[in-house]
Image (cartoon, rainbow, N blue to C red):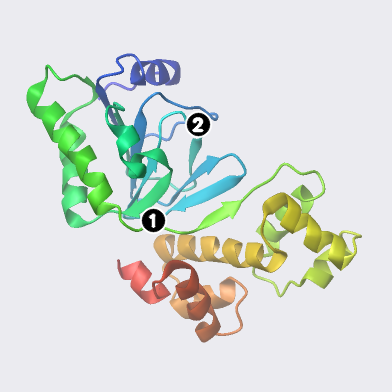
């Protein structure tokens, strides 16, 4: 497989607005924030990934794909070695009539969609309408997405460049497994509780406790998918005092039990 240079890769995607661009790679590109004139489907096979847009980070678990609408500035992060990163960039004809294609979403991959995505690995680069069979196959894959992507994966972790919150967010990222309270954090960073609470709400549109809960769930999903820890071990490793409390919090956010999530 020829590996395009990053500059060539980004230019080639949008070169032909009516084509479908396909790229399967066993490398992780370190891309800065960018956008495309085509909608993007990305499936990371064999690893958990994150997609970052302005002030929000979304987790992409195993057996899920992300749809990125055209024009949305973003970048992808893979924290562990992935088997293959599968990218398909679609022309935008007809997208405005289908709400699915207008917003970023992370959706589960069922067996049908997985087989179709893997089948596309025989193609790379621009696929135009003149290349009838692959173009029709890829177009059919795109047309199926709104029917298959009924329920998006719900976990999005807010981010910020706010100078007052940055050291607090960094501390939480290192100590999320500890018993942390708003009072403790306010004292540690020399703020009143009320000030810190308002800062989270005004800057991140989320409470301190909601942010900590989301952060713990993100770390829990990574552990479920990328370690051999038991559910009980993950519960305590993410700061919960009991398996029951962890399972309840996980289910409230994902509508899936943590034990079932790993199996799926």
State the residue at coordinates (24%, 53%): 148
Please give the label number shown on residue 152: 1
State the residue at coordinates (46%, 59%): 154
Percent of width and height locating residue 193: 85, 67
Residue 244 visible (yes or no):
yes
Crowding around mark 1 (Cα neighbors within 10 Å: few <14, some 14 to 19, many 20+) is some
Residue 67 in the figure: left or right of residue 174: left
Residue 139 in the figure: left or right of residue 5: left
Q: Work out which quarter of the rendered image holds the N terminus and state it.
A: top left
Which is more toward the observer, 102 or 124? 102
**Dot 2 corresponds to which residue?**
30
Check the image and report above or below for 141 versus 205.
Answer: above
Residue 25 visible (yes or no):
no
Percent of width and height locating residue 160: 69, 45
Element marked by disc 1: loop
State the residue at coordinates (12%, 16%): 130
Q: For the residues marked 2 and 1, what is the alpha-carbon distance in whole angstroms?
A: 26 Å
């Amino acid at each position: 497989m020829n590996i395009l240079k990053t500059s060539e890769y980004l230019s080639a995607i949008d070169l032909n607005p009516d084509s479908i661009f396909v790229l399967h790679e066993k490398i992780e590109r370190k891309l800065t924030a960018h956008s495309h004139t085509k909608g993007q489907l990305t499936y990371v096979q064999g690893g958990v990934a994150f997609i970052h847009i302005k002030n929000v980070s979304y987790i992409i678990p195993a057996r899920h794909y992300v749809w990125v609408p055209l024009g949305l500035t973003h970048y992808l992060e893979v924290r562990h070695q992935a088997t293959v990163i599968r990218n398909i960039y679609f022309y935008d004809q007809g997208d405005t009539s289908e709400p699915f294609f207008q917003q970023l979403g992370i959706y589960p991959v069922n067996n049908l969609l997985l087989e179709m995505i893997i089948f596309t690995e025989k193609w790379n680069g621009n696929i135009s309408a003149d290349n009838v069979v692959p173009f029709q196959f890829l177009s059919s894959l795109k047309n199926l997405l709104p029917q298959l992507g009924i329920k998006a994966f719900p976990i999005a972790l807010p981010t910020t460049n706010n100078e007052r919150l940055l050291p607090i967010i960094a501390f939480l990222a290192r100590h999320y497994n500890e018993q942390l309270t708003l009072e403790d954090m306010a004292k540690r960073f020399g703020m009143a509780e009320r000030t810190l609470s308002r800062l989270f709400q005004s800057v991140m549109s989320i409470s301190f406790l909601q942010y900590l809960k989301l952060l713990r769930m993100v770390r829990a999903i990574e552990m479920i998918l990328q370690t051999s820890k038991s559910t009980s071990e993950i519960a305590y490793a993410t700061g919960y005092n009991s398996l029951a409390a962890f399972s309840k919090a996980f289910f409230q956010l994902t509508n899936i039990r943590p034990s079932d999530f790993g199996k799926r």
